[in-house]
Image (tube, rainbow, N blue to C red):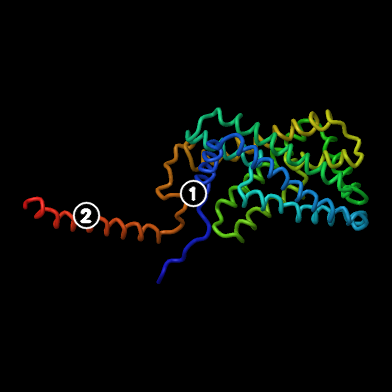
């Protein structure tokens, strides 16, 4: 009976894939890190605007049952992460885990942490901000959409520093698990499911995601929200970035390095991360056997020629 091929990697192999992703990112030229971060910021705008337009139109229904608006917003928002993760985009939130994991495993230098973190943050911010400005220029930030944008922006600066930081921790824990599950799945459907559930969960719960806030707060400010630039930076961006970094670099990268990597004194996986079943072991064994026979046969033929 033929063995069933798995389409999901084990958690250890998934972590090692995350490490490899961090190594790849750390080795990129800064201009490419910025380019992919800028694109990711724009994609955040696409998903954020989709949620604003559709959920904003449910204002009347939300008066009777606010959960309806929250659910729709959360259900639509993950489209941006689907595009980003499946097209090679770079978000600050995922970078905080992948590059840190590569450092824990001693596969890249620690200096790549500030190097990639700063460039990813700036690229995300500029992409999201320019997208928000274009939305405003095109007169798309108005009516019910603008009302929801104002409501969201003003709500995001009301919590104190510690509470916003903790919300940032909860958010990026979920975002990094979406990255983890996306790497674990080996088909498009699995990747989409692995991304959708954690992302929609953090949005519905009300956690704080710095790339999303880079779009939503400026959008609300452009619509007339009572939020200053200083409020945005000090009351939201700073604690949210801190919380996202703690979750990505310490909880997810550090936690899974302890579970499967060097911090926990674990041995590397005996298989390359792209192998997902025992079938590969059998194929490799057969190849090794064939190679040995070929070498032996080649030696037997060559000896007489040398003697001649």
Q: Is residue 201 visible?
A: yes
The vertical placement of 239 against 76, above or below, is above
Q: Is residue 254 visible?
A: no
Q: Secondary structure at mark 2?
A: helix
- Which mark is nearer the camera, 2 or 1? 2
**Residue topped by disc 2:** 295
Q: Residue at x 92, y 54 (%)?
A: 63
Q: Secondary structure at mark 1?
A: helix
Q: Nearer the viewer, residue 127 or 103?
A: 127
Q: Residue at x 43, y 43 (%)?
A: 268
Q: Is 9 placed left or right of 168 in the picture?
A: left
The answer to whether mark 2 and mark 1 are in CB contact below 8 A is no
Characterize the local packing of mark 1: few (<14), some (14-19) or many (20 or more) Cα atoms within 10 angstroms.
many
Q: In what quadrant of the picture does the N terminus appear?
A: bottom left
Residue 35 quadrant: top right
x and y percent of residue 241 in the render? 71, 34
Q: Is 6 placed left or right of 192 in the picture?
A: left
Q: Nearer the viewer, residue 289 or 262?
A: 289
In this view, the residue farthest toward the bottom is 1
Q: Residue at x 65, y 31 (%)?
A: 118
**Residue topped by disc 1:** 13
Q: CA distance from mark 2 to mark 1?
A: 33 Å
Q: Residue at x 68, y 44 (%)?
A: 39
Q: How many marks?
A: 2
In this view, the residue farthest toward the front is 308
x and y percent of residue 249 in the render? 60, 35
Q: Is 149 placed left or right of 265 in the picture?
A: right
Q: Is 213 placed left or right of 21 in the picture?
A: right
Residue 302 quadrant: bottom left
x and y percent of residue 307 in the render? 6, 51
């Amino acid at each position: 009976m033929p063995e069933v091929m798995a389409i999901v990697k084990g958690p250890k192999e998934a972590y090692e894939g995350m490490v490899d992703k961090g190594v790849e990112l750390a080795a990129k030229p800064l201009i490419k890190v910025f380019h992919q971060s800028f694109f990711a910021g724009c994609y955040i705008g696409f998903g954020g605007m989709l949620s604003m337009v559709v959920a904003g139109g449910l204002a009347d229904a939300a008066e009777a049952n606010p959960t309806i608006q929250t659910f729709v917003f959360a259900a639509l928002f993950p489209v941006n992460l689907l595009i980003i993760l499946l097209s090679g985009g770079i978000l600050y939130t995922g970078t905080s885990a992948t590059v840190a994991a590569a450092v824990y495993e001693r596969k890249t230098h620690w200096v790549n942490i500030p190097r990639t973190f700063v460039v990813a943050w700036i690229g995300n911010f500029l992409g999201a901000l320019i997208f928000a400005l274009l939305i405003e220029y095109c007169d798309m930030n108005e009516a019910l959409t603008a009302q929801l944008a104002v409501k969201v922006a003003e709500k995001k600066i009301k919590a104190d520093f510690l509470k916003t930081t903790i919300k940032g921790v909860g958010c990026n824990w979920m975002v990094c698990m979406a990255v983890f599950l996306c790497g674990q799945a080996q088909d498009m459907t699995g990747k989409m499911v692995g991304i959708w559930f954690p992302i929609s969960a953090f949005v519905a719960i009300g956690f704080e995601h710095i790339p999303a806030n880079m779009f939503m707060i400026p959008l609300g400010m452009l619509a007339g929200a009572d939020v200053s630039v200083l409020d945005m930076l000090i009351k939201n961006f700073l604690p949210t970035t801190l919380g996202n970094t703690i979750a990505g670099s310490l909880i997810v990268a550090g936690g899974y390095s302890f579970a499967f990597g060097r911090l926990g004194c674990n041995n590397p996986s005996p298989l390359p991360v792209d192998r997902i079943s025992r079938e590969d072991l059998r194929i490799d064994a057969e190849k090794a056997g064939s190679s040995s026979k070929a070498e032996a046969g080649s030696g037997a033929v060559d000896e007489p020629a040398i003697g001649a």
